Amino acid sequence: MKKATLRLTALVMLLAGSNVTKAQTADPINVVTSAVPFLRISPDARSAGMGDVGIATSADANVGFWNLAKAPFATNKMSISATYTPWLSDLKLNDVYLASLAGYYQLDETQAVSASLRYFSLGNIQFTDANGTNLQQYRPRELAFDAGYARKLSSKMGLGVAIRYISSDLAGNTSIPGVSYRKGSSIAGDIHWYYKGTNADGNGFDWGATLSNLGSKISYTNDANQKDFIPANLGIGAAYNKKLDADSKITFALDINKLMVPTPPSSSDSAGLAEYRSKGVVSSWFSSFGDAGKDELKEATVAIGSEYWYKDQFAFRAGYFYENKIKGDRRYFTLGAGLKYDMVGLNFSYLLPSGSGVNRNPLSNTLRFSLVYNMNK
């Protein structure tokens, strides 16, 4: 088995929203890829129900996944959330799932700490050699643990930083002639900024910007030339909040994300591939904003969402996620709902099915369930 096959298996299972039949279009497909792509999956049901937005929405237990700088502005002193997502269930893969646990705690009125854990199970996979002979069965799995600190810079502005440990075990200690595979690991960091423009009446704009997964490459072998970029990302978000009356309020949010990962050259460009492999981590962040030429803007994804609350007890959500067809072609609508009673909340999201036959989106009917516990100030 080749290392490329292992990475491709993980990538397809994670980002299978791409429509392979689009390869027949006139535009050449050139998707920006990275290792551990599970870090770019929306890990909580609230944001998933809003089309995967979360950079500038109001703070909740999952701030560490989206924008830690929101934590000191949260209305609750402490919040904890657990989420379970059956992944690719529409393809009858019953043993593939993403689970997460996250929370924050406000030390005082100006600062907060957070921690979160993501665990992704790729199910049971039969490994074979190049001739199709069975080698072994294995359960690939990946996880990320992070801890962070956030502080108010003023009554309206906050800054957050986090450090993250990433572990990716795709093939265990499998060995074939000439290659020995191992568990990959990496250390990364985040920088988050948040501006709260919403006034005391609950009306106004909030803004945010994030730099996430800024860290070292990850390797699955002892070959120094076979290291992969992790999904460093730049995110910018805005949210408009409006209090409709004494009982109801609504939010409209927009997130734009751009992977800070180099655009891969053509597979036939051996010199370009060698340069791509040897590129340094920091230089890759900067070069990622200009190496795609006229297609650079197409590498950005756009998510829009809305959330309506009634009496701060019942929430209804909807959203849309867009990715250009030559950069992955993930496009889907989402719906969500939330119920909050006293200190306990329950969130639910649903990714609407789209397409049919070979054009059907494999992410169709994706469900997420989040249980939230809040402790008031």
Image (tube, rainbow, N blue to C red):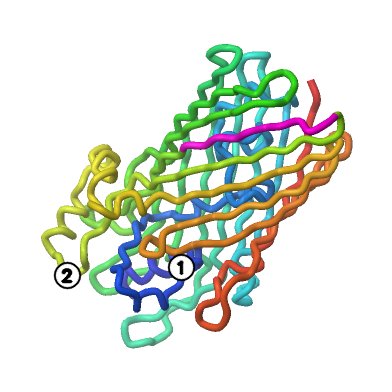
Q: Quadrant of the N terminus?
A: bottom left
How far apart in space, not on screen, are marks 1 and 2 (Cα)?
23 Å
Question: Which residue matches tag 2?
Answer: 268
147 vs 337: above or below: above
Question: Residue at 55% across / 23% down in the picture?
Answer: 195
For residue 18, which numbered disc appears in the image?
1
Q: Position of residue 7 (x, y in %)?
A: 38, 65
- From the viewer's perspective, is 259 left or right of 267? right
- N-term-proximal mark, 1 vs 2: 1
Q: Which residues are magenta?
A: 236-245
Q: Position of residue 291 (x, y in %)?
A: 23, 49
Question: Which tag is nearer the camera, tag 1 or tag 2?
Answer: 1
Q: Amino acid at mark 2?
A: Ser
> Residue 51 colored magenta?
no
156 vs 346: above or below: above
Q: Classify mark 2: helix, strand or loop.
A: loop
Question: Residue at 55% across / 37% down in the picture?
Answer: 55
> Residue 239 colored magenta?
yes
Q: Amino acid at mark 1?
A: Ser
Name which quarter of the figure residue 376 lies in: top right
For residue 45, which numbered disc appears in the image?
none
- From the viewer's perspective, is 100 left or right of 184? right
Q: Classify mark 1: helix, strand or loop.
A: loop
372 vs 178: above or below: above
- From the viewer's perspective, is 225 left or right of 333? left
Please identify the residue farthest to the left as the structure is shown: 271
* Prevailing secondary structure class for the magenta stretch in the rendered image: strand
Count up the numbered dots: 2
Q: Quadrant of the C terminus?
A: top right
**Residue 118 versus residue 368: which sits nearer the camera?**
368
